[in-house]
Amino acid sequence: MTISFCAEDRKFPSTLKRTLCKAVIQTIVAQETKKPLDYINFIACSDEYLLTINKEHLQHDYYTDIITFDYSETCIESDIYISIDRVRDNAKEQNVSALHELQRIIIHGVLHLCGQEDGTPAQRARMTSKENLYLPLFQ
């Protein structure tokens, strides 16, 4: 099982406690799915880098904070791209710290890998509820 934090054209902030983050991810996976965790690569990038991925792979022409590529079959395998620029902007809009917003977005991506959807208002409400459930684990 591997959880890695990689940098493309942005870096994850040094305030992200990676060991704690990995423990939180393992807890979420254990509670939300029966699939074992093989690997998750978190890749920090810019708005422009993620926009290019969004256009090329999803045919979406807009900024987003996260794109989760789920390669899972019998176990969880994924690359998760996170726009550090978008995380910072979202944090300002939500009046929370950038670290808090980054933790929330990491949880969001992992929940997607565990089968949680957010395409409808009801699904978004469930996703937000689960994010709020797991955020205190970062304390």
Image (cartoon, rainbow, N blue to C red):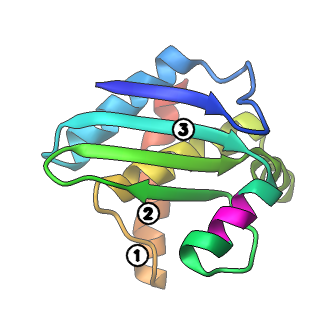
Q: Quadrant of the N terminus?
A: top left
Determine which residue is flagged by label 2: 127
Tell me which secondary structure the magenta stretch mostly adopts: helix
Query: How far across and down, in percent of the image, does residue 45 sit?
Result: 73, 44
Give the label, 3 or 1, closer to the camera: 3
Which numbered circle lies on residue 42? 3
Query: How far across and down, in percent of the image, does residue 57 sit?
Result: 55, 70
Residue name at image x 54 percent, y 38 percent: 42
Residue name at image x 25 percent, y 36 percent: 37
Question: In this rendering, would 136 be left or right of 49?
Answer: left
- Helix, strand or loop at disc 1? helix
The amino acid type of the residue labelled 3 equals Phe
The amino acid type of the residue labelled 2 equals Met
Which numbered circle lies on residue 123? 1
Q: CA distance from mark 1 to mark 2?
A: 6 Å
Q: Earlier in the sequence, mark 3 or mark 2?
A: 3
Question: Would you say the residues marked 3 and 1 are in contact, meaning their CB atoms lie under 8 Å apart?
Answer: no
Residue name at image x 64 percent, y 69 percent: 54
Q: Earlier in the sequence, mark 3 or mark 1?
A: 3
- Magenta segment includes 52: yes
Question: In this rendering, would 44 be left or right of 38?
Answer: right
Up/down of 17 relative to 49, above or below? above
Query: Quadrant location of residue 23?
Result: top left
Question: In this rendering, would 129 be left or right of 57?
Answer: left
Region of the chain picked out in magenta, as a range: 50-54
Q: Quadrant of the C terminus?
A: top right
Q: CA distance from mark 3 to mark 1?
A: 24 Å
Question: Would you say the residues marked 1 and 2 are in contact, meaning their CB atoms lie under 8 Å apart?
Answer: yes
The amino acid type of the residue labelled 1 equals Gln
